[in-house]
Amino acid sequence: MDIDWPDLRARCRLAEDEAILALNKPAGISVTGERHDIDIVTAAEAAGETLYPVHRIDKVTSGSVLLAKQLSAHGQLTRQFTKQTAQKTYLAVVAAGETPLPDHGTIDLPLSVGRKNRVRIAAPREAIHRTGDQWSVAEADLLKTKNYPSLTEFAVVDRHRDLTVLALHPRSGRRHQLRVHLAWIGHEILGDPLFDRSGGHPRTHLHSWRLRLTADWRPDGRLDLEAPPDDAFWAPLPHPPKALPA
């Protein structure tokens, strides 16, 4: 897939200063490191602009992507993702499932990497327990493999008969964390190529909505990004939510 970098840059720009460029990335475009497709970083480089990715979101995920124009800013920002101090909020449209989700909840399920480099919960599915608004596994049930503590908080934004809209706050930043956590508790993200078997959805309905980081070169010392979802994100719903959380 070719990328018209000047067009994408102008159309998707959320914020820019001397140190960073933030984009509202469309679904279906990679940030960096894609083998077979041209990604954002490569497309920018081909157009004469050097950008350093601060973080990644999956190719199938839309929303806020932060890129550094200066290495000094890149180091400051990436450390916040590494130390898990960057505040991230996603929106997702998920299957309502057999049991409705509570208004707020916590998914505390360690992740591991299985066959074909696939991310999974580091325990058998039947070992996952729900207690009130929390999902977890006992330490004794963990697989005998390396695992990574992973925590996701969520709040219900809107409910429909078969679908639920969630605001998701990943406290950790593991690969595929949100997609795996939701699928393994029975509320897979609509259109997720890894877990959604319902079919008929042209995109994955996961969106990187808000990012908050410290940025000492800015007058207020903060970088607050909000990427509004496009109409395609809301397409499976009868109507978008009347209001999103503050």
Image (spheres, helix red, strand yellow):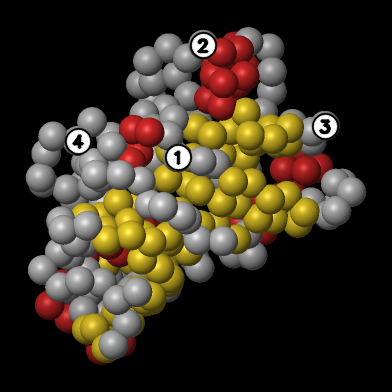
> On screen, 79 above or below 54?
below
Disc 1 to disc 2: CB gap under 8 Å = no
What secondary structure is found at the residue carrying circle 3? loop
What secondary structure is found at the residue carrying circle 2? loop
Q: Position of residue 39 (x, y in %)?
A: 48, 24
Q: Which one is earlier in the sequence, the residue at label 1 or at label 2?
A: 2
Q: Residue at x 26, y 67 (%)?
A: 121
Residue 229 badge? 1
Q: Amino acid at mark 1?
A: Pro
Determine the CA span between mark 3 and mark 4. Answer: 39 Å
Q: Which one is earlier in the sequence, the residue at label 3 or at label 2?
A: 2
Residue 82 badge? none
Q: Quadrant of residue 138?
A: bottom left
Determine the CA span between mark 1 and mark 4. Answer: 16 Å
Q: Amino acid at mark 4?
A: His
What secondary structure is found at the residue carrying circle 1? loop
Q: Which residue is mark 4?
A: 201
| Front in this rendered view, residue 2 or 157 | 157
Q: Which residue is mark 3?
A: 18
Q: Residue at x 35, y 21 (%)?
A: 36
Closer to viewer: mark 1 or mark 3: 1
| Front in this rendered view, residue 230 or 170 | 230
Determine the CA span between mark 1 and mark 3. Answer: 26 Å
Compared across the picture, whether 50 is left or right of 180 comes to right
Q: Which one is earlier in the sequence, the residue at label 4 or at label 2?
A: 2
